[in-house]
Amino acid sequence: MHNILIATVILSLNCAPIAVYAMPEPVPAGQTDKQKAAEKKKREQEKAKAQKAKEKEKAQREKEKAAAAKKKEADKKKAVTAKENAKKQEEREKAAEERAKVAEKRAEEQAKKEAETKAKEEKAIRDYEKYQESLENPKTEAISYFNLGFRAGYAAMMDKIAPMENGSLYGAGTLNQSNALQQLRGGAGAGIDFTYSLEYGHFLFETGLDCRFLNSTSDYGFTAKRIDKNYNAEYYYLFDDLSETRNMLEIGLPLMFGAQFDKIYFLLGAKVHYGLPMGYSQKGQYDVTVKDPAFIDPYGMGIYDLNGQTKQQMVFKQPDISAAAEIGLDLDEWLQKQPDPKAKKAKVKPGERLPFGQEHIHYRVSLFAEYGVLNSNATPKANPVEFAADKVEVQNTNTMLAMNGNTVLNNLFVGAKFAIQFEVPGKTARPVPPPPAYAIYSVVDAETNQPLPLALVETQNTKTGKIALREKQITPKGLRQKHALGSYTATAKAENYYDGMQSFDIENVGTTEYITIALRHRPVLRVRVTNKETGMVIPATIQIRKSGAEDPAYSLATDSVNGSARQMLKEGPKYSLHIAQMGYDTLDMAITNIGDSLNVQLTPIKKGEVFIVKNLFFATNKTRILKTSEEALNDLYMYLARNPQVRIRIIGHTDSVGKDEANQKLSDGRANEVMKDLIERGISADRLEAEGRGESQPIDTNDTEEGRQNNRRVEIEIL
């Protein structure tokens, strides 16, 4: 019961405020409808305000939610970017490692290549030193050649007719041997040989196959007697003009020994030949005289031509042995094609010869003599001429070698020989060329001693004047060039630098000379032209004159962007700057330092000022403007285009030659022609006026041609 009372009290206390709040507020006495409406409106406003606050709170929550989502997305994107950056960084590091590896590999390859090059150079030096030692203690080497020779010269078949045992021949025809005469004329000979030769030191040996053709002519005179038994008459034949030409073709084996001394050589020995049966030919006339018992005195039968009918061929003994001699000269120095030093030759090992080529072809010329020491005649015995019993004329002829079985024939062949030798390559020692020497060029700045980015170098042999190195570009790494021994002068050039020279000597093979050429920087004159009043750049023509000279030594044009120009001037002379720009006062100033940077300001010509247009030319006594005035007109146009606020008056003047009216008209026409040209170029006509003043305002005398030329002018007045 006690507990029930306590719970009732607690519930009463807690529910009291709720009851109070739920109870309607009592309406005061006398409250109007207007007050009720106001209170209702107030409640609605508070409700709307609460709703707006609620919506605002909701929007704030949504905004915070969107911001959180955006932040989450940004964090996600940032994480992706960071991941990508990390990946890229990893790739960059990996690429850097790869580049480092490639660079290291290249460095190793370069070092290896340099080491190999150095080893080759050192080996070349050792081989050359070894070769030099071999020259001091030379070893004899055997060299083989295959030769092709061509011979031509004088040939002779020298016959010696032995006397007959009883001094005469009997039979159908007889030859009076005691009256026989003979004379050797000889002929031409030619030969070709294919031989093998061996050279061992100075010793020479040659053998092979030898072919020769000999042609020889001999003249004979003799008498013959024939008895006609039918009439008991004697016929006498006089052969005083008979010639016999013989041919001989032989194939043989030469055995020659000799020696070689520098370019001269000789050979001695024998040649064994086998001759082929060959023919002969005769020609001539004979006189016939008859002693007839029926007549007291002999009488002539006339002169007859030898009929040339051959019967007996020449036959030779085998073999034919000749003593031979030859002396000659090597022609390699003049005829052998020298190897091209620029050509790439096959690499060979030390002591080996180069592969077969033109350096193995040699040439020789010589004089030779060959004489047959054995009798080569084997022609059977026969009378030189044969008769018929009932004929007066000669019926057949035989070679003169057959007129006696003991006739001796010896052959002679002398002349010149040209031979081509094919050297057989072998492993005998060959000359070793000296290892090359090198010069390493570098071009540096004389002040900083740093290599120039780009330069040109040319080297000349000091003694001969020949170019040893044609103009080549040199980078900061330098240039390595092969040179022969000698004295040289190198000239270096680079943009904005004075030329430099360096002399050096290369005295030993296999060495390297380091040539450093320092160049002095050339001073550069820089000029910038601006308008004194506006500060704007002015495209202008600048003339740089030497002191005392009217013609410019240099002519520069400033650009339209920054109004500047530059020029390197030669040291020594004094220079001055001259600028005569249209629409501006002329400027003349001295140049104190050819390396200065000058900022030149030109004063524009102001309103009311007048200046003369230079280099404006017209046809004589005409208004037509000559083409040579283009530059002056363009300058005037550019001045007006750059100064659109300027108006001008174009004033024409003439000299006093001619009538006043004509001069006035001429000046008007010329001024108008200039105005017309400017309008065609794009200048508005509102900015231009033209006026002619004839001869009324001279600026010089009209008594001289020079003065009249100055008076003939066009002026510009700034309006």
Image (cartoon, helix red, strand yellow):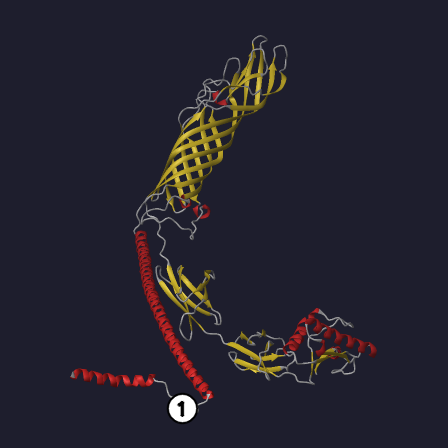
| Screen quadrant of the N terminus | bottom left
Q: Secondary structure at mark 1?
A: loop
In this picture, residue 155 sits left or right of residue 204: right
**With respect to residue 565, does 389 lie above or below?**
above
Q: Nearer the viewer, residue 122 or 117?
A: 117
Q: Toward which corner of the image does residue 532 lie, by quadrant?
A: bottom right
Total tally of numbered discs in the picture: 1
Q: Nearer the viewer, residue 61 or 580?
A: 61
**With respect to residue 688, does 38 lie above or below?**
below
The amino acid at mark 1 is Pro
Query: What is the x, y in percent for residue 20?
Result: 32, 86
Query: What is the x, y in percent for residue 284?
Result: 58, 24
Query: What is the x, y in percent for residue 682?
Result: 68, 72
- Extreme residue toward the bottom, this view: 30
**With respect to residue 642, does 109 lie above or below?**
above
Within-10-Å neighbours for mark 1: few <14, some 14–19, many 20+:
few
- Extreme residue toward the left, this view: 2
| Screen quadrant of the C terminus | bottom right
Q: Toward which corner of the image does residue 669 lie, by quadrant?
A: bottom right
Asked if residue 328 shows in the view, the reply is yes
**With respect to residue 406, does 483 lie above or below?**
below
- Extreme residue toward the top, this view: 230
Query: What is the x, y in percent for residue 648?
Result: 70, 80
Asked if residue 547 shows in the view, the reply is no
Q: Give the residue number, with chain letter if any, for mark 1.
A: 28
